[in-house]
Image (cartoon, grey):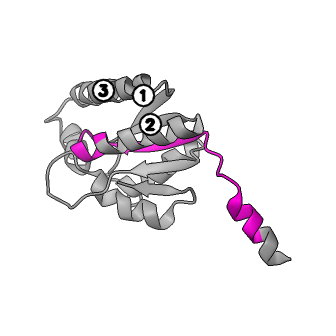
Amino acid sequence: MHTEQGAAAADEPIAVETVLVPVDGSEASVRAVEYAVAVADRYDAAVHAVYVLGEGLVRAIESGSVEEEEAASEARGFIEDVREVADEHGVSLSNSTTYGFSTSSKMTHPGSVVLDTADDVDADFIVVPREQLTGEPGEVLSKAAEYVLLYASQPVLSV
């Protein structure tokens, strides 16, 4: 009887209301947005895009070599591109921005902020960019993918 119940549960479709997609302005995050919107469209769900600021940018902001408003403006521009993709498919989009690194907390890293955001927005599904590390600035999320895949309680699609 236990096997039958398990089989019945496995046959039930998953319920998805919010798809989280972390972005960092990279080409990999553009691809992740496309997948996140497709998943949201399929399940009649919404997308939440979290723009994760990487270590180099956070250090530059903290040292004053980059203005926080300049970084925020770049993030807003990318999110507007994300909004266009969502709008094309009639998918609702919300967004936030977060530091993916902290000089004062070892517990703050890209993977942890993605999972914290997933909890904050009650995400049912995560689409995370994953590609080979190239050392390119802005590609902070490829470092987070493995962490998210290991520790997320939600289903994760790594693209």
Residue 86: mark in rendering: 1
Which amino acid, by three-letter code, is at mark 3?
Answer: Asp
Which amino acid, by three-letter code, is at mark 1?
Answer: Ala
- Judged left or right of residue 15, residue 96 is left
Graded by Cα atoms within 10 Å as few (under 14), some (14 to 19) or many (20 or more), the crowding at tag 1 reads many
Extent of the magenta region: 6-30
Which amino acid, by three-letter code, is at mark 2?
Answer: Val
Marks 1 & 3, CB-CB < 8 Å contact: no
- Judged left or right of residue 140, residue 116 is right
At horizontal 26% and vertical 47% (from top left) the residue drawn is: 28
Q: Position of residue 159 (x, y in %)?
A: 34, 54
Graded by Cα atoms within 10 Å as few (under 14), some (14 to 19) or many (20 or more), the crowding at tag 3 reads some
Distance Cα–Cα, label 3 vs label 2: 13 Å
Q: What residue does disc 2 label?
A: 37
Q: Earlier in the sequence, mark 3 or mark 2?
A: 2
Marks 2 & 1, CB-CB < 8 Å contact: yes
In which quarter of the view is residue 32 placed? top left
Q: Position of residue 145 (x, y in %)?
A: 36, 59
Q: What residue does disc 3 label?
A: 81
